[in-house]
Image: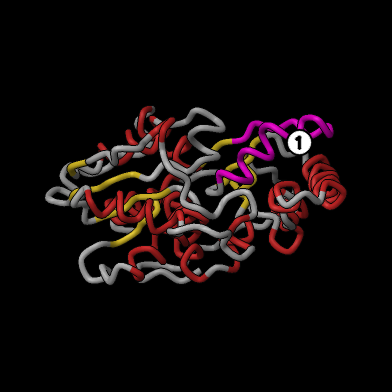
Amino acid sequence: METKQRKVEVPVMADLLAKGEKPEYLLWIGSAGAFDDRYKQVSRAFVKILDHLGTSYAVLGTEESSSGDVARRAGNEMLFQMQALMNIEIFGGYEISKILTCDPHAYNTFKNEYPDLGGTCEVIHHTQFLRDRMNDGTLQIPEGALEGKTITFHDPCYLGRANKEYRAPRQLLDALSASRKEMPRHMSFALCCGAGGGQMFKEAEKGTKEVFLERTEEALETGADIIATACPYCMVMMTDGIKYKNREEDVKAYDVAELVAQALKL
């Protein structure tokens, strides 16, 4: 991965195993983080932070498949179990005990659904990891990094309501010294971006307004310069909503990891 400052080498689990090394974390990239052009930028930002912190981690590379989340949400239970059992076997082969991911859907599936099939790992969302590193002093965010900016945070459904994690991303955003303004519907009452549960991959159902447009309108009404997200699905929908509303010049959608990386000048 190229950066303006340096080239960051991303370690691969199989390569480390061949050297007799065992990293502390598996970084699960996810389909969006690997293939979606916009969310690749989030993967790069988080990798730069991991490198900056000296974190012991590795990715699966070509051995990484789907978590199975979309298959189960779409009703294909057989495919979900096939994908899950294959991943669980790979995790066991590498003796993986901790999984890091930027995707709340993978986070939820690994944490709450894989144990039923024998997969038990500690699963950590990237906002939780960064919050913990900030709290233990490993991650030091410069004061005034985004001073003068106004941020509103959109709660991902599978991070918030499904797993009750509301504070970690907000604690990180508050450390950036920006002004944070909540939408009327936030935390446990937050409105979905409209993409989860497999909805991103099907045609819209009958109705008067797309969900992502209503959510984007709520975000824009806060007067925020930045709509912060912590999920690849939310990133797509908020970015599309900003474009639809012709607000690309004055409002940006960023993942929390990108904002932290910007603050660190990585």
Residue nearest the observer in this picture, 180 or 142: 180
At x 30% / y 56%, what residue is drawn? Answer: 262
- Residue at left 69%, top 38%? 110
**Residue 51 on image: x %, y %:** 47, 52
Let me know if residue 131 appears in the view: no
| Residue located at (47% from left, 46% from top) | 192
Across and down, in percent, residue 148 comes to 12, 50
Q: Would you say residue 262 sits in the magenta stretch?
A: no
Q: Secondary structure at mark 1?
A: helix
For residue 198, what is the image quadrant? bottom right
Instruction: Tell me if I can see residue 97 in this picture.
Output: yes
Which residues fall within the magenta stretch?
Answer: 104-123
Q: How is the image coloured?
A: secondary structure
Indicate whether residue 121 is drawn in magenta.
Answer: yes
Q: Which residue is mark 1?
A: 114
Q: Quadrant of the C terminus?
A: bottom left
Which secondary structure dominates the residues rendered in magenta? helix
